[in-house]
Image: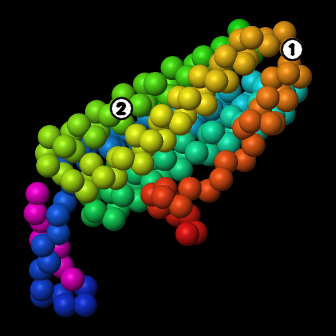
Amino acid sequence: MLAAVYDESHPLKALEVVMPAARFVEQLNAQIGHEFAAHQQYVACAVHYDLLTMPQMASFFYRQAVEERDHAMMMVQYLVDCDAAVIIPAVAAPKSTFDDIVEPVRIALDQERRVAEQINALTATAREASDFASDQFMQWFIKEQVEEIATMSDLLTVVSRASHDIEAIEDYVAREQGSPDTDPTAPPIAGADR
Ligand SMILES: [Fe+2]
Ligand SMILES: [Fe+2]
């Protein structure tokens, strides 16, 4: 879709810019809500482990929560960069009480799988509309979901196997899930210094 915008240095000169497809914009705004909902869910998971004095699991989920917020803010930045409407959605309350130490990880894995489907659907929408910039924007998220599903799947295996050995779980997380490296290919985050 083409739209006319004005070049501020030449107020009378209209520039033609490619706008993202309307259906993609609507779906990406909804996804901002899903990412913030994932943030809330991961904070609830982190608090559960914090209260059980499992500091490594708590830190892991607090970090995951920040990553989800970053995903939402990458989507905000993309829409801002495209001069597209940004409507921050409401989010439903997360599950905050859990039966045991396995359930939060099972919920996290389900959530990552659901988000992967949403990311694929967004990519399909961009492709159907021949919106190549939005298609390319989604590619980083496709890769990210593969990694997040693998991480949560591994963690579910470990937590299920060692559900009566909290120290073994904490050691695994400390060893295998330390602070992630910064990813220079990540899209810019709205409001972040970069
Ligand atoms: Fe995410
Ligand atoms: Fe995620």
Name the residue that disc number 1 marks.
165
Residue 123 lies in quadrant:
top left
Q: Going 12% across and 65% down the picture, which residue do you hit?
A: 3
Q: Amino acid at mark 1?
A: Asp
Name the residue that disc number 2 marks.
118
Residue 116: which numbered mark, if any? none
Whether the magenta-drawn stretch holds residue 100 is answered as: no
Q: Amino acid at mark 2?
A: Gln
Image vertical order of residue 106 relative to residue 141, above or below:
above
Q: Earlier in the sequence, mark 2 or mark 1?
A: 2
Residue 79 appears at what percent x and percent y?
A: 33, 57
Residue in front for this viewpoint, 15 or 180: 180
Q: Is residue 120 left or right of residue 130?
A: right
Residue 15 appears at what percent x and percent y?
A: 14, 78
Residue 95 appears at what percent x and percent y?
A: 60, 20
Q: Going 89% across and 22% down the picture, which residue do you hit?
A: 167
Q: Going 17% across and 69% down the picture, which residue do you hit?
A: 17
Q: Is residue 55 left or right of residue 6?
A: right
The reply to whether residue 97 is visible in this rendering is no
Q: Label 2, secondary structure: give it.
A: helix
The residue range painted magenta reads: 1-7
